[in-house]
Structures are given as structure tokens and as C-alpha cells.
Image (cartoon, rainbow, N blue to C red):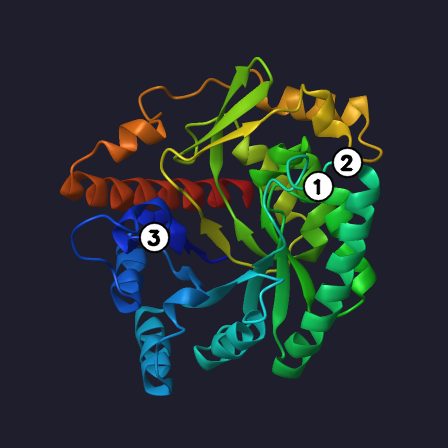
Amino acid sequence: MHRVGIVSYSFEYSLGIFGYQDRPGDRFDVLTLLDKIREAGGDTAQLPDFMFRSLSDEELKDVQRRAADLDVALELLGGVAWNQGIEAAMHRARAIGSSVVGCTFGILTRPNTISTLSDWDDYLARCRARYAELLETAAALDLKLGIENHLDFTVEELRDIVRDADSPHAGILFDIGNTLGTLDCPTEAADLLGPYTVATHVKDFAVENTTRGFRLTMVPLGAGSLRLPQILEHLEQHIAPEVNFAVELLNGQQLEINWLEDRFWAPFRDKTAAQVAGTLRHIQGKAIDSDLFLSLKDVESLPHEQHVALELERVTDSVSYLRDLLTRTQQ
């Protein structure tokens, strides 16, 4: 059975990262984070490289030993592929015993950063070239380097990048919720990207219609608009047994996908009405659990101790939900 774990960003407040860098109070270090992931029921930990950059070789070994003692498999999030430091991150992955590294090329790239199709084509060519460079390092270290669908590439574009790389070290970090950012149906994405998947982010979004498209709010697994049983049933038909599942839950994170604007589609090619309709069918008709819906404003207003407790409670419940769901889909 696949391992089930947690993406470290699910503890963003406890770690004091992203929007919480200036908050008062203590922060989890990497060893505490591993303990908390295990406490929440996880046996896989996806950890960001920035937690390791200042550690000595002996401290990296301490991380590897703690993970082994806890029976927690480690995967490294190497960061943005354009950064020169990602090669060093891949070496640190090996130092902590990880065989999988995830990377991104951007987020919500279209249309605000890249607004025309010709510019997008140029960008895709640069992404392919950079990925080829990084795969040389991955091959030397015997790593899998998975590109995340980070609300930038369509599922076909990402599949083609990885397939055309023609390397046993190439793969995809498949985020089942981020497909909505490019109006790709998550179930169809599972079929298309599953054979190339080397790591996962399992999340749920509550989808609300807006005048310009829709708003995605991250919620605990099962509380949102994604049809998780259907997605995972399809995904399990394609992925290898050693691929782990990792819950990602940034409480209250909200994203605006303004797909009803003409400018949204200018940098896209060959997105059919049937594909968009499939995505809309997927997210419509499933009720959002309003008791578990919290906006970012709601979350940020919590006192320190309540916020720390909320993260642990919600990720624990989501890990349990995912384990139960995987048990049912495998029967």
C-alpha cells in the first residue's frame, strides 16, 4: 500500500513561513516537524530545501536517522527550477536519504506574467532546456526529479515536457487540485499524468463562482469541491507502488482563477470547450462543508496556540481521511 504523509507547508504557521515569517513565538525545526508529521499519522514527509541549507553534514545525518527511527520516508521540495541553488538541493536530498525531488517553474504564470501565445511558446522551450540540464544532475545522483503542475502548465504541456525528456529520472509531482488553475479536469489529469507521477500533493479546494471565474479556497480533504474518490481511483490505476501520497493543506489559502476574462486564454493553445466543460462538471454539484470552511482572514485571526492546534488537527484528520479513502479504492 502507498505511504501517506504530509507536505511541510501544511504547517506553514507552525514553521513561521510564507505570510507568517514575522509572527511571534517559537517555530518548528526540522526534527520537530518530523515528529509532528508522525504524530498526525503520516509516514511520508515532503520537506523544503530551505530547511536544510544551513545544516552541517552531521545535522543532515541526524535528520536521516530521525526519519528512519520514525519510519517516515523523506521527499525534498527543491524549489524553483530556475534557481541555481537547486542542484545543491538535489545533493542535499541524497544526503538525507531522499530519492525524489520536486521542483516548480512558476505559479499562475498566465496571463499576468506571460500574456501572449508566442511568449508562452518561448517560455516552454526554455523550460524544456532547463529541465534537461537538471536531469543530468538527477541522473548522476540517481534521483527522480518531478515537475509540479503549479497552476502554470496544462496537463498536456507538462506530460509532453516529461515524456519528451526521455529519461528514467524525469517525472511529475502531481498536484490533484492545481489542475483547476488551467481548467483541466482532475480526473482526466490523473489518467494523463499518472504514468509519469513520482510524487503527489493531495488537496481539496472549495470552489466558489465569481464574476470573473472562480475562487479556490483550500480546505481539509473531503470538505471541498473535488471528487477525491474518483480522482484517486483513476490515479491508482497508473502510478507505481512506490509513489507516496502527501496531504497539502494551507489553511484558508485563496486563489482567484479569472478564466472568464478574454485575456486569460490568450497564452493558451488548443484548450477545447469540451475540456472546460469537463472541469466545470467535476466541481459542480458537490456540496462544500461550510463547518470546515475557513477563509484566510478567519485563519489569520486565530490566537497563536489555536492556530498551531488547528494545523495539527486538520492535517491529522486529512491523513486519516486519505488513508480510509485509499483503503476503499484498493478493495
Disc 1 target residue: 114
Disc 2 target residue: 267
Q: x, y (%) of residue 106?
A: 61, 50
Q: Which mark is on residue 206?
A: none
**Amino acid carrying mark 3 in the image:** Ile
Q: Are marks 3 and 1 in contact (CB under 8 Å)?
A: no
- At a point 64% along the width and 36% down the height, the residue shown is 112
Q: Distance from label 3 to label 2 (Cα)? A: 32 Å
- For marks 2 and 1 on the same chain, the one whose residue lies earlier in the sequence: 1
Q: Are marks 2 and 1 in contact (CB under 8 Å)?
A: yes
- Binning the other alpha carbons within 10 Å of mark 2 as few (below 14), some (14 to 19) or many (20 upward) gives some
Q: x, y (%) of residue 28?
A: 25, 60
**Amino acid carrying mark 1 in the image:** Ile
Disc 3 target residue: 17
**Amino acid carrying mark 2 in the image:** Pro
Q: Locate residue 132: give its quadrant.
A: bottom right
Q: Distance from label 3 to label 1 (Cα)? A: 27 Å
Mark 3 secondary-structure assignment: loop
Mark 1 secondary-structure assignment: loop
- At a point 34% along the width and 52% down the height, the residue shown is 17
